[in-house]
Amino acid sequence: MRKLTWLLIALTILWSGGWFWGSSKVREGIDQWFAAQTAQGYIAQNAGFSVLGYPNRLDVTLDAPKFADPSTGFGWEGQFLQVLTMTWKPWHIIAALPPQQTIRTPDQDIGITATSLRASARALPQMILPLDEAILEGTAIEATSTQGWTVALGTLLLAIRADQTGTNAYDVALTGTDLEPDKAFLAALSSDAGLPSRISSLRANLKARLTAPLDRSAPDTNPRVISLDVNEVAVTWGDLTVFAKGKIEPDAAGYAAGKVDIAVTNWQRLVPILIAAGVVKPEVAPTVSNMLKAMAEQNGSPFVLELPLTLASGRMALGPLPLGPAPVMAPVTN
């Protein structure tokens, strides 16, 4: 019994020594990382940090962190950032995000508030730490822009999982509930639309193929999307439902190209939305409505409209309606 007691004491001392050694290395690594980012011209600041969690975890809490890239104008800052990991499983981390934070972009700042917002990432236990799964989830989220718009979301779940059957392929799943559009948009939406103030559900399942894997070398390889399979996008807003499926990939100039087939049930609700969004002018709404009605009847159902979202030559169009420039999926080449 005495030998067992001394063995337990020795193991405790060794484990404790290992934890304190590991925590000191974490502190050293944090200081070095912030110094390296500053030396490279980035903004990386904090008002202090702590490393706790003895004996089984390493919990890092950054006070008032701020990160920004002056060359692009993008940045993030918050009240705190907490990163939690088990000492025996360092390739799996959980991040607790603050109830208030700010995302900075070149043309606007977006303030985010949430009742709860956290993320987790799990890599495979390999030297290059290839991403296996990443999850972001939150409740009662509200985003307010310095440009004047505000949107809210009841719940959010975003998951990215590596597809082991494809090279640099990742499955992306998104679900959201109780999405409230900007109040100015809702005010512009006529009462004839017959739609509630909140979009009850949003669901998307995509497969993205990248130029490089998401691993520890990603900051250097800068992975970019080279194809996007839209397996499903489904939106329910009152009795208006939208379902989409298709494939998008960049053309030779780097613009998104392809076709996504869209089916809209109770498409009559769609016309007021297009007017409120500024896509269709009120004076031409009757013409657009008659045109969509004729298209729906050609498909065999007066309540279901089937039309493609076409991306070609750097432009987008929803059926016969032009929507403007197509997004860029890869750097434009000459």
Image (spheres, rainbow, N blue to C red):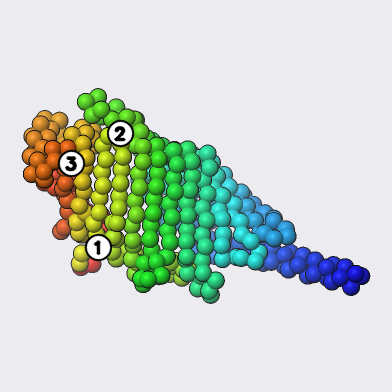
Q: Give the distance between the C-alpha atoms of the residues marked 3 and 2, in whole angstroms.
A: 15 Å
Give the farthest residue toward the bottom: 127
Q: Residue furthest right?
A: 2
**Sooner in the amino-acid sequence: mark 1 or mark 3:** 1
Residue extending farthest to the front is 300
Q: Secondary structure at mark 1?
A: strand
CB under 8 Å between callouts 1 and 3? no
Identify whether 75 is placed above or below 130: above
Q: Point out which mark residue 249 bears.
A: 1
Element under disc 2: loop
Disc on res. 190: none
- Name the residue located 37 percent from the left edge and 71 percent from the top edge: 165
Residue 293: image quadrant is: top left
In the displayed structure image, the side of residue 259 where residue 153 appears, left or right = right
Badges 2 and 1: C-beta atoms under 8 Å apart?
Answer: no
Q: Quadrant of the N terminus?
A: bottom right
**Element assignment for label 3:** strand
In the figure, is residue 5 to the left or right of 263?
A: right
Residue type marked 2: Gly
Give the mark nearest the N terminus, 2 or 1.
2
User: Is the C terminus in the top left, top right, bottom left or bottom right quadrant?
Assistant: bottom left
Residue shown at 17% from the left, 53% from the top: 310
The residue beneath circle 2 is 238
Q: Nearer the viewer, residue 283 or 120?
A: 120
Q: Amino acid at mark 3?
A: Val
